Amino acid sequence: MTSTVITAAEYAAAARRVAELTRDADGAAGGTAWTLHDADATRPDRVYLTARRISPAPAANVGAGLECVDDDLTFQADEVDVSDNEPARPASSWLQWEIHVVYHATYACPALYFRGSALDGRVLDEVAAVQALEYMRAASHLAAPVSTAMGPFASAVAAGPHPALGTPFLYLHPCQTHDLLAPILGPPGFTARVLLAWLSTVGAVFGGLVSTAQWTAVKG
């Protein structure tokens, strides 16, 4: 029986492969652009992937629950990419999400870390971020993500330092990740394909983080 314990080295190899495959796929078709951060080759547990998303803010969230400004998070209003069919909205009614895939050493598995903020860089606190994610989940007609099967969505969100950066982030608690991965972990172990399968499930609340082109690339 294949073990569901994932080593940092296995995770790092899968993350590097996902970055390669999704970069190639995104050159030909749209999808979430994942950037690999791999500064220390001797610390596979410090390897992580990042992506960004823009989403409409719930009316109750505009201007509420916003904390300090982080210049690295600031977007310009003209960077917002929306559908031609989307009604014009002021910059204050949009939220940006910084999404990180990291290795969680305690649970020995990948974890999804994230921060939400206004376009001027003011970061959402935990309550406002959860409210915004619930709004996105309802708007996309999702039921509950698999990671929240044990209770309300808010119970699946925790706050803590980023494993590689040490800065405050929110994350989806990985306590059920091994149960989620067990049916898809085959003899090859934890691969890029398994990482994308996990990401397509836990990332559903962000509107889906894996494109068809990325799936095609990783299966090829």
Image (tube, helix red, strand yellow):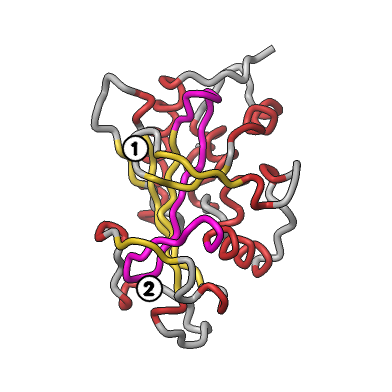
Query: Tag 1: residue type?
Result: Gly
Indicate which disc residue 166 carries.
1
Residue 19 occupies quadrant: top left
Relative horizontal placement of residue 208, taking residue 103 as reference (left or right): right
Q: Is residue 205 left or right of residue 118?
A: right
**Mark closer to the chain start, 1 or 2:** 2
Q: Secondary structure at mark 2?
A: loop
Which residue occupies the extreme bottom position in the image? 88
Residue sitting at x 34%, y 37%: 166
Q: Mark 1, mark 2: which one is toward the viewer? A: 1
Q: What count of labels does the image hold?
A: 2
Q: Which residues are magenta?
A: 103-128
The answer to whether mark 1 and mark 2 are in CB contact below 8 A is no
Q: Is residue 117 magenta?
A: yes
Q: Residue at x 45, y 26 (%)?
A: 11
Q: Is residue 184 visible?
A: yes
- From the viewer's perspective, is residue 123 above or below residue 80? above
Residue position marked by numbered label 2 in the rendering: 80
**Residue visible at 55% across and 25% down?**
107
- Give yes or no for residue 141 being in the magenta stretch: no
Where does the N terminus fall, quadrant-wise?
A: top right
